[in-house]
Image: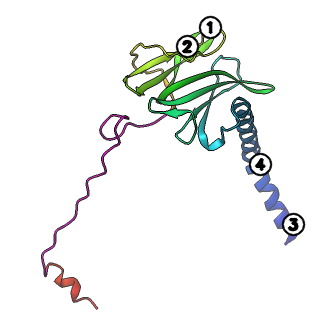
Amino acid sequence: MLPIMKILGMMLLRCFGPIFACSAVVLAADEAVQGALQEFDGDLKPEHYEIKKADLNGDGVEEALALTNGLSAYAGSGGVTLFILRGGADGFDIIGRVPTVNPPIYLRADSHHGWRDLLVRVAGGGATPHLATVSHDGTSYPASKGTDAKKVAPTDKVLFDDPLPVDGHHDAPAPPPERKTAQLMPGELAEFDQLP
């Protein structure tokens, strides 16, 4: 019986070993992102943001984008903060902090200074809702967003998705779904009353 267990164990390791190895690499990368964010602000915790990865400068190394949420101190009536971190052999360094953005956030095909542009939604806090481009300025991704009203292009890739509520606006909460209840008259369920 022991040789069969050993063979099964080897087969499982051979089949699923790469999955476990990939998971370990992803966890290490997320820990490196967490380390860079905590170096910036020790109060940022993993539950305060969502991470997406993309190669922004075409060097074959993925950068990390961390979009904060309402649990962090980086959220307000105008939106949340997007942190952009450059990936490298030594981990991640913050190369951009763009406040007051809202999902969806797109990776554009266009680039400036060798870095891909981002398309962000600006809304809330009194701003007229619009899409704006965030472009690398040669040194970093600046905090200011363009005020241009852009449209999503077919080549834009969704990084952070947040479908609009039923009313089509993020500013107002979606109304609760309409509940329909059946109105029964006395005696309409008489056939069920007779079941054993």
Distance CA(mark 1)–CA(mark 4): 40 Å
Within the magenta stretch, is there residue 126? Answer: no
**Upstream in sequence: badge 3 or badge 2:** 3
SS assignment at label 1: loop
In the rendered image, the vertical position of residue 9 relative to residue 189, given as above or below: above
Q: Residues within 10 Å of mark 4 (few under 14, many from 20)?
A: few
Q: Is residue 153 visible?
A: no
Given contact means CB atoms under 8 Å apart, are the residues at marks 1 and 2 in contact?
yes
**Upstream in sequence: badge 4 or badge 2:** 4
Q: Amino acid at mark 4?
A: Gly
For label 1, the residue is 113
Q: Residues within 10 Å of mark 3 (few under 14, many from 20)?
A: few
Q: Is residue 109 visible?
A: yes
**Upstream in sequence: badge 1 or badge 2:** 1
How far from the left and from the top, in percent, is residue 6?
85, 62
For label 2, the residue is 135
Distance CA(mark 3)–CA(mark 1): 60 Å
Distance CA(mark 3)–CA(mark 4): 20 Å
**Quarter holding residue 182:** bottom left
SS assignment at label 2: loop
- The boundaries of the magenta stretch are 161-187
Name the residue: 60% across, 40% down. Answer: 48
Q: Kindly report which numbered mark, 1 or 4, lies closer to the viewer in this rendering.
A: 1
SS assignment at label 4: helix
Given contact means CB atoms under 8 Å apart, are the residues at marks 3 and 1 in contact?
no
Q: Amino acid at mark 1?
A: His
Q: Amino acid at mark 2?
A: Ser
**Quarter holding residue 50:** top right
For label 3, the residue is 3
**Quarter holding residue 140:** top right
For label 4, the residue is 17
